[in-house]
Structure formats: structure tokens, C-alpha cells
Amino acid sequence: MKIGIFETEHFEGAYPVIRLFDTPQNELFIFTDNKTYKRFADLFGTSTSRYQWKILQKGALRLSFFWKFYRAVKKIKPDILYINTISSNHLLFALVIRLVRPCRVVTTVHDINCLFQSKPAASLRILAHHLGKRLLLRWVKELNVVSDTMIPYLETQTKGTKVIHNVPGAVFDNYQHPGISSNYFHLVIPGSIDRKRRDYAQVWALLQEAETRQFPLYLTLLGGYSDGYGKSIINEAREFPTYFTHLRFYNTHIVDQHEFDQRLNEAHFIFIPSVVNTAICHDIPEVYGITKSSGNIFDVIKHAKPFIAPATLKIPEKLSTSAFAYQSVEEIVNYLERLQAQRSSYELLLQQALKNSGEYTTEKVRAANPTLFEAS
């Protein structure tokens, strides 16, 4: 079968989709732009040539980009068109989807409330987005969410009118880097610096608590910045006084993929200081773990690492036994001190993380979504 996959933003989220559809009976076509293609190439390496890449040039006119997308889809005639991210231009996406009928279309919903709870406004831009969302909900029959924790809420919104898939934002390749053997714990916070996704006040509080207790903590902010807020966090990191702790950060817009993976491989824990109740899309409220999912959960899966997350963040049940849920940063340091005193407990936790990630292999994810992958 011919499978078309569209992605120009979350290249790391489309990576598992491509891997899952990559079977002998399928021919894969990836629709993307130049910038995202380069990130895909970093991820796939020498395997990049396995797929047929349709690079759509972005110009001054959005309509031109979507016209090229439509023409490319019509020429290929895929049996399934999988659109992995729609964060803007909803109306243009909806029109393309309508015009490529009878192609089977699946779209990933990253922010459920953004799609279902939008309202018209005086702004022409917001009004166009709202109309596009309404048309998407009318014309798309199959939706995907990247975390199973989002399924119950999506079901309440769709009221049984849509087919719902759960293709996670990562698959596990059956290999775990155990981290660097040392007398400290290395916590990594992956992802771009963003006030709506991560609470950096918790980061500074954790470092300060570790300093006060003279606890040897190593913490990495593994992400670049894109705005003034991100730059301010980098400046705070540069000026933060560390004596017993160590803080690494990246004064750049993008962290190289190899560097990103290497630092996660070295980590002992992935730290997720999530802003659980947030609003990213036109100030529409979202709840991490219920109406959207943190990408850090998929870093946990891919790298098979234990992780530390707020007690209020709903996480997949399959990962719960390798997670430490905290209510205060003091609890985090207490926990790490206990593990430091008994390192064998950490080794058992690492083994549990490996077992948990084993639930997300390509074989198991395909088996859990038979209506999507067996049909292809």
C-alpha cells in the first residue's frame, strides 16, 4: 500500500509513525519542508534513502504551499494520508483533505481542547482557524493521540463519531544506555525552553535545595531557546551560583540531534517539571496528560530512563513503575539521597525502565493498533 505522511514541525514525533508503517508491503512517501527534512535526515541517518521524500518549498504565500501539497498527494494517490501535526492553517488543511477524497485520512490531535473547544472571534485569523477546525472535525473520520492517557477525554469529545488510534510519540529500539557511572545523579530536562511547557522556577528551587544540602546533583537543560523568555532562562542559568551542583545549558536555538541523544543516554533520570495546567493554542486551557501529552514522556520511552514528574501529571500506566512522582522539590532531593545511599535500588529502577519501554516496540504498537497497521 502507499502511505503518505505529512510533518513539518514535530519531526521527532513523526519518526515512530514512519518506523511503524515501514513494512515490506508498504511504500512510504514523506511530505515535509527543507528545514524539517534536515532534522529527519539527522534521525534516520543512512536509512533516510529508504523513503520517498516530497520536499514542499515554503514561500511567501501559504496557499502556494498547500496547493503543492494537494498536487503531490493527488499524483501519488496514497491509500492512507497520515497528517501528524496541524498547529495552524487549519482551513487550508481541511480543504486539502476534502479535495483528496476518497483517500483515507488520519490526523494526530496534539491539543484536544484546541481542536474541540475553539470559538469564533473578531480576529479574522482566529475566525479562519475556528472554521478550519470545524471542517476538520466534519471531514476527518480517524484521529490519533500520542498517549493512551488522552483517549478517555477524546472519547467524551467525539461521542463515538470518530475512530481513535493511539500511536505513541516514540518507539523503543530494545537498547538502553545505563548512564555514566559516577557519584552524582544526572538529571536531564529535554526540550526547548518554553514557559508554557516547563516550570523553570522548580528547576532553580531544586538546584538551590541540592546546594543547601551539599548534594552533588548534575542537571542539564537540554534544549535551545526561541524567544526573549528562553534567553532570560539561559542568562539565569549562566548566573546561577553552583558549588556542590553542576548545571549545563545550551546558548543556542537548536541542540544538535547527536548531542541531544548523547546527553539523554548519559542521564540517570529524565526530569519533567511540567506546567500541568497550561494554555498554548489561543489561550484555550489544556491539561498535560489528559488533553495533551508532554514530549518528555516519549524521551523516557525511547531512551528507557527512569523519570521524575509532578504528582499531578497523569502518565501512562505502563511507565508508572519507573517514575517518581513529587509534590515538592524537597521530595526529589530526599528521593535521590536515598538512592545515593543504596545504589542497588537505582539499578533495579533502571531495569524496570527497560522493561517498561519494552511495551513500546514497533511490534507491540502495531499489534495494539490493528485497524491502522494491519490494514496497511
Image (cartoon, helix red, strand yellow):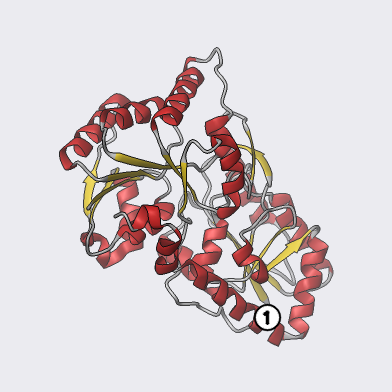
Judged from the image, the secondary structure of the residue bearing numbered disc 1 is helix
Q: Quadrant location of the C terminus?
A: bottom left
Residue at the disc numbered 1:
346
Quadrant location of residue 178? Answer: bottom right
Q: 130 or 245, which lies in front? A: 130
- Residue drawn 75% across the image and 74% down it: 336
Q: Residue at x 74, y 79 (%)?
A: 339
Q: Position of residue 152 (x, y in %)?
A: 61, 46
Mark 1: give few (<14), some (14-19) or many (20+) Cα within 10 Å.
some
User: Where does the image place residue 113, in percent across and percent down from the top left?
Assistant: 58, 35
Name the image quarter holding residue 175: bottom left
> On the picture, is 62 further left or further right than 329?
left
Q: Amino acid at mark 1?
A: Tyr
**Residue 176 in the image: x percent, y percent?**
50, 77
Height in image: 356 above or below 43? below
Residue appearing at x 61%, y 41% in the figure: 229
